[in-house]
């Protein structure tokens, strides 16, 4: 056996421990990255929830894996033999090993990840995460330092309160979710009727009895987005 080009050590205890360390390291890095950095990455920018955002995240994790394997490899073969060449060898071998599973993950994301999954993350020290199918989201409403998420679950109306301003959650959403008022973000695909006027207008959402005001400030933006899908 000669994992990552260190030394031939045969089927010995040392050999087993080396192979085990090369296997455990990437698994631990992926787990820790998801546990401690995943939520921060997804909540800090809009691209994180797109197809390209998923690819970028896996490339970041792959970089962490390369660095981790490099340190493990250097620990086994000795730091005196480590350097740029050792890092390049590690990079090459990690990419060769990871290219097939990473490609499969990217293809899977491309095929199913364009499904309209939406992840909303609260503004807490220990953020609360809500994952929704976009087609089930109705609207978001500002409630002081909180935002209420209104959605359907198994055909039943539900409401979830998360800490964070409406602007905080606006950064996490994408079309067809648009702002129509300082207090509301709505799902364009749930709009049943629209009535616009010089002061803004009103809309109604499927399954919701009350109407929602479109303020003049957001009316042009709303009408532009609405015309793109209807």
Image (cartoon, rainbow, N blue to C red):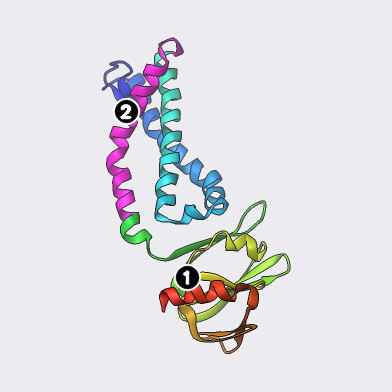
Q: Is residue 10 above or below residue 103?
A: above
Q: Which mark is residue 176?
A: 1
CA distance separating discs 1 and 2:
41 Å
| The residue positioned farthest toward the right in the image shown | 144
Secondary element at tag 2: helix
Quarter of the image with the N terminus in it: top left
Residue 106 horizontal side relative to residue 224, left or right: left
For disc 2, the marked residue is 92
- Answer with mark 1 or mark 2, whichever residue precedes in sequence: 2
Q: Does the magenta portion include 88?
A: yes
Q: Residues within 10 Å of mark 2 (few under 14, many from 20)?
A: some
Q: At 35% across and 55% down in the image, what residue appears?
A: 109
Magenta residues span: 79-108
Q: At 26% across and 18% down in the image, what residue appears?
A: 10
Quadrant of res 86: top left
Q: Nearer the viewer, residue 107 or 6?
A: 107
**Residue 81: x percent and y percent?**
40, 11
Q: Residues within 10 Å of mark 1 (few under 14, many from 20)?
A: some
Q: Is residue 138 visible?
A: no
Q: Nearer the viewer, residue 33 or 115?
A: 115
Numbered circles on residues, count:
2
Quadrant of res 180: bottom right
Quadrant of res 21: top left
Quarter of the image with the C terminus in it: bottom left
Secondary element at tag 1: loop
Q: Is residue 132 visible?
A: yes
**Residue 123: x percent and y percent?**
65, 57
Residue 84 horizontal side relative to residue 92, left or right: right
**Residue 166: x percent and y percent?**
64, 66
């Amino acid at each position: 056996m000669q994992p990552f080009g260190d030394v031939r050590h045969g089927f010995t205890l040392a050999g087993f421990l080396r192979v085990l360390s090369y296997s455990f390291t990437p698994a631990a890095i992926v787990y820790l990255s998801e546990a401690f950095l995943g939520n921060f990455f997804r909540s800090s920018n809009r691209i994180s929830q797109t197809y390209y955002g998923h690819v970028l995240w896996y490339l970041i994790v792959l970089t962490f894996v390369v660095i981790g394997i490099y340190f493990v490899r250097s620990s086994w073969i000795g730091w005196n033999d480590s350097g740029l060449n050792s890092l390049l060898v590690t990079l090459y071998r990690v990419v060769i090993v990871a290219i097939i599973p990473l490609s499969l993950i990217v293809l899977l994301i491309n095929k199913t990840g364009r499904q309209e999954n939406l992840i909303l993350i609260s503004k807490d020290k220990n953020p609360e995460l809500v994952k929704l199918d976009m087609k089930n989201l109705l609207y978001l409403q500002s409630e002081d330092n909180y935002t209420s998420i209104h959605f359907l679950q198994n055909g039943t109306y539900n409401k979830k309160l998360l800490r964070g301003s409406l602007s905080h959650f606006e950064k996490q959403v994408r079309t067809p979710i648009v702002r129509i008022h300082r207090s509301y973000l709505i799902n364009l695909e749930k709009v049943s009727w629209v009535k616009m006027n010089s002061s803004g207008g009103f809309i109604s959402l499927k399954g919701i009895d009350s109407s929602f005001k479109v303020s003049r400030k957001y009316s042009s933006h709303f009408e532009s987005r609405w015309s793109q899908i209807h």
